[in-house]
Amino acid sequence: MRQAASPVVSVGFARFHPNLVVGGTYSGQIVLWDNRSHRRTPVQRTPLSAAAHTRSNGGLVPNPLQTCRPAPVGIGSSTGPHPVYCVNVVGTQNANNLITVSTDGRMCSWSLDMLSQPQETMELVYNKSKPVAVTCMAFPTGDVNNYVVGSEEGTVYTASRHGSKAGICEMFEGHQGPATGISCHGAVGTVDFSHLFITSSFDWTVKLWSTKHNKPLYSFEDNADYVYDVMWSPVHPAMFAAVDGMGRLDLWNLNNDTEVPTASVTVEGASALNRVRWSSAGKEVAVGDSEGRVWIYDTGELSATHADDWGRFARTLMEIRANQADGEEEGPMELAPGETGEPAVLKTSLSLMSVSTVMMLCTTVMKKKKQQQKKQQKKKQQAS
């Protein structure tokens, strides 16, 4: 059991340092544990300093929601906590850095040997306007400069650490609620899919993107609650895993179907699942729930790869692009009096959400209602 002075909202093993575990906290502090030490508390932590992610707040640290990943609050303010949902170690064995981003849009680069001061900082601002309220981040495999981030508004951005275009580069719109997870395609094979990435959101969807297009290539809409996290398989080009607030783990093989998951399982007790990770071999998947439990599943033959999977996925993408025009969403529908269609998406405390976020979630409810009606009509037509 490892402990910190503030709720830990992101965590990961430090790549290239198998004994080190990095955590991002709700207060904005970065903490580092060493598995070789018997101490429960961190062996290193960043100071409470304006140089990184923490701000003066009178010593008070609000508690986040305990049932799920907390919704960002206080975005863009100069005081109060700025949670660090993004921690990632990038580089090589001999030259690597810890990259962290907080919800006020500040990115910091650190040496794991010294967390007293960031080596460099950058404010992530789009079009010279307000800071990007970053909630998730991912680097393409082998890339230490370019990365993608999701935001509280649901907008996704590409960004660079260095060069003439350092900072936020491009904007991608499509989600109607905060982005909760993001994953870059990493399976290596006969076709290069490194331009692809997927995102999950409070709007109940997972979306497939390409850095070559600023609109989603496809929207997966089989969930009926927040989708908290998503991750590509590290070995299968067409497979990803997603988890939602109903305690459901979905495995999608896009070579088989893009409408429904290839396999699904709901954890015991149906607690909300808010994290998903593949093993490096792509044969097991681990999920974490809102009760603090971790579940590990053997994916067996479901995740087995075949020589033609890359070619099949290339054809699947061509079909998705060909049908993209037919899948354009219509505007929000008006609900009849008393017909709220309220899903679990509105049952979380709204006190931690901005007004704009609440409005986006309400719009999502209306869109979902119309989508459900469309599916019912389609089923009736097929039955007749």
Image: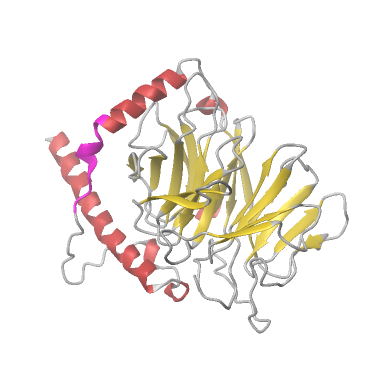
Residue 150 x %, y % = 47, 53
Q: Nearer the viewer, residue 19 or 91?
A: 91
The total number of labels drawn is 0
Q: Is residue 324 on the magenta stretch?
A: yes
Q: Residue at x 44, y 71 (%)?
A: 353
Tell me the colour scheme of the image: secondary structure
View extreme (top): residue: 307
View extreme (front): residue: 164
Q: Quadrant of residue 28?
A: bottom right
Residue 302 x %, y % = 51, 27
Give the answer, above or below, for where 253 lies relative to 158: above
Q: Is residue 249 on the magenta stretch?
A: no
Q: Residue at x 42, y 18 (%)?
A: 311
Give the answer, above or below, for where 363 lies relative to 111: below
Magenta residues?
A: 322-330
Q: Residue at x 25, y 60 (%)?
A: 366
Q: Nearer the viewer, residue 193 or 285?
A: 193
Residue 347 x %, y % = 41, 68
Residue 373 x %, y % = 20, 51
